[in-house]
Image: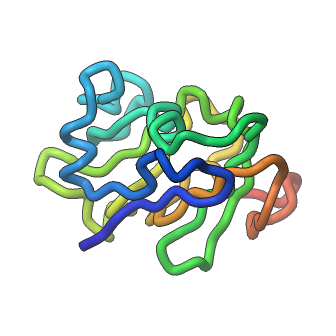
Amino acid sequence: MDELQITGDVRDSGCHSWAPTDLDRAPASARVDDLSELVPGRQGRGVLFSWLVREAHPVSGVSWACLESTDGSFAASLELGDLEAAVVVHADADGPLGQARGGPFRLFIPGASDACGNIKHLGRIALGHGPERDTRPPADERNC
């Protein structure tokens, strides 16, 4: 089964992995039932990224997230402040988000100026105090 993992500077008391069905059981305040309301032209349902971070119980001072694809070929280090409105999508009208649509988990950042931060095939989130691995092209060369 596909699971989203949160690692790094987190307390043992937190939740560090989620299956798509776990995200369907998130509290209503954390769920996004219609992604198109936040990201026009995009479909799906998911949860707020900020809720996942809180559920992981990060240690004090954590301010960065390294977001990696399931196969580890893509990574982006972003400040948590830039991810405040981000949504982790795990399903669409047909059910679990398939590989062809960027699943099993896909991150969208509403209003982001850098589309390279919208991560397909999201598999791991590493929380920390500074940037980690980042495979994106230099900012002036990005065309994601």
Is 110 on the left-hand or right-hand side of 127? left
x then y, percent, for residue 64: 74, 45
One can see residue 53 in this view: yes
Point out the residue furthest to the front here. Answer: 13
x then y, percent, for residue 101: 33, 61
Residue shown at 69% from the left, 36% from the top = 80
Residue shown at 30% from the left, 51% from the top = 90
Near-viewer residue (6 or 47): 6
Residue shown at 52% from the left, 53% from the top = 12
Number of marks drawn: 0
Say if 92 sits above or below 100 in the image: above
Is 97 on the left-hand or right-hand side of 60? left
Picture quadrant of residue 3: bottom left
- Which corner quadrant holds the N terminus? bottom left
Residue shown at 70% from the left, 44% from the top = 114
- Which corner quadrant holds the C terminus? bottom right
One can see residue 144 in this view: no
Picture quadrant of residue 42: top left
Is 39 on the left-hand or right-hand side of 144? left
x then y, percent, for residue 140: 88, 53
Say if 71 sits above or below 98 in the image: below
Chosen colour scheme? rainbow
x then y, percent, for residue 122: 48, 61
Near-viewer residue (78 or 18): 18
Say if 75 sits above or below 140 in the image: below
